[in-house]
Image (cartoon, rainbow, N blue to C red):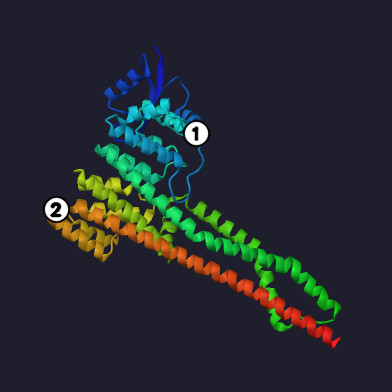
Amino acid sequence: MPRFTYRALDKSGASVSGTVDAPDRRAALRTLREQGVSPLAVHEGDEAPAMRETKATARVQLGKRPALGAHPVSRKFFQKLERLTAGGLPPGDAVRLLATRSGDPALKRLSEEIWRDLSEGRTLAESVRRFPDVFEPGEAGLIEAGESTGTLAAAITRLLALQAAREELRKKLTAALAYPTLVCGLAGVTIALFVFNLLPKLESMMQALNAEFSGASYALITIARSTVYGLPLFALAAAIAVARMKTMRNTPAGRRKTDALLLRLPLAGPIVRHAETSGFSGLLGTLLASGISATEALRLAEKPVSNEMIRQRLAEARTQINEGVSFSAAFRRQGLLDEADLDILTVNESTGTLHAGFEEIGKSHFGELDAALRRLVNTLSAIFLGTAFAIVFFCLVSVVLSVLQVSQGMISG
């Protein structure tokens, strides 16, 4: 009889592994469930599950998702899944159908890997987490919440709405930053031509006439040269800072420290707060409307939160709510919502429509997120344009003053 190697979770949630004899994989899965464990991976033979996961992941090279916005394959996958499940098809069968009949090669490859995971006993959320370059952590959290509560269809619908909103924000940012980027590029070309082409010729002329640059001309030329020659040093310092930040975020303590710093930044902090608040508030509204208990809804709403400080505050608020504290009081103590949001929460909590309050708060903060992003773009645009025009102005003034100095030298000569 064939022997199957498995990895599973026992009743306490601990990871266990071993082997089981069964005529086929389906029988092996049934045997393990009868033993009271939840299979995560089951395969025939002695090959380590980790090796199988590595090989499976290596076969799917779909590129990385953009910094803001959804991966194209991720969006296609969830759109197809929503349509198939809306027609009454179970999620597992829907994924299998995509794996066998999809005409998109990238979508087909991704669906094949996810179907392999599902057939081995993994949940859809566990499989999604195996592809961090395609799916965001928050997307896996939404899927897990839907699977845990039996509202997977609603979770996918909400996920697609969030993806569409992020994509719209990405397009707005790209369009808003296009013009400042173009102007800065032209300014950089102008400065480079001045420093590397025009300035050496002016210096040669001044030396031939035994003349010297005036103090104002020399100061402006020094600024232009410092700008050009300082760019590599600035780029190196920025690269070192980014590398150091990534190293810090590899540890839990470093991640908490950087996330706390991010919340305190003038422009980035409000964006992070509005994005996270909109996410967990909207998810809480969906879960509570589905009849999920407050404790379970809060636990599931914590998982999609990427900022460690906000996630920790949510966990502490959940503990206080379990001890009998109201939602509004717990969220006020943890500083998770502002006063206007707390007023909404207090009213809806007293009327028994807590889910509606969270949904309203989620929509409000999404609008605030859009406004915060516009403020960031406008500020960056003003800084970029102002810097570019100032540098070009300095270069032009330097040229004019240098020409005048040359003219005076020729007259005096």
Q: Is residue 145 above or below residue 325?
A: above
Mark identifier at residue 306: none
Distance in Å between CA atoms under marks 1 and 2: 47 Å
Farthest residue, direction bottom: 412
Q: Is residue 96 above or below residue 289?
A: above
Residue drawn at (78%, 74%), measured in percent from left and top?
202
Instruction: Count the labels in the image.
Output: 2
Residue drawn at (21%, 43%), measured in percent from left and top?
290
Circle 2 packing at 10 Å, graded few (<14), some (14-19), many (20+), is: few
Residue 161 location (% of width, % of height): 34, 47
Farthest residue, direction top: 1
Residue 243 location (% of width, % of height): 55, 54
Residue drawn at (58%, 64%), measured in percent from left and top?
183
Q: Quadrant of residue 169?
A: bottom left
Residue 13 location (% of width, % of height): 31, 36
Q: Amino acid at mark 2?
A: Gly
Q: Is residue 136 above or below residue 24?
A: below
Dot placed on the residue nearer the N-terminal end, 1 or 2: 1
Q: Is residue 315 visible?
A: no
Please name whichever residue, 369 or 34, is drawn nearer the observer in this view of the structure.
369
- Residue underneath mark 1: 60
Circle 1 packing at 10 Å, graded few (<14), some (14-19), many (20+), is: some
Left or right: 375 in relation to 315: right
Please name whichever residue, 398 or 359, is drawn nearer the observer in this view of the structure.
398
Q: Quadrant of residue 350?
A: bottom left
Element at badge 1? loop
Mark identifier at residue 352: 2
Q: Amino acid at mark 1?
A: Val
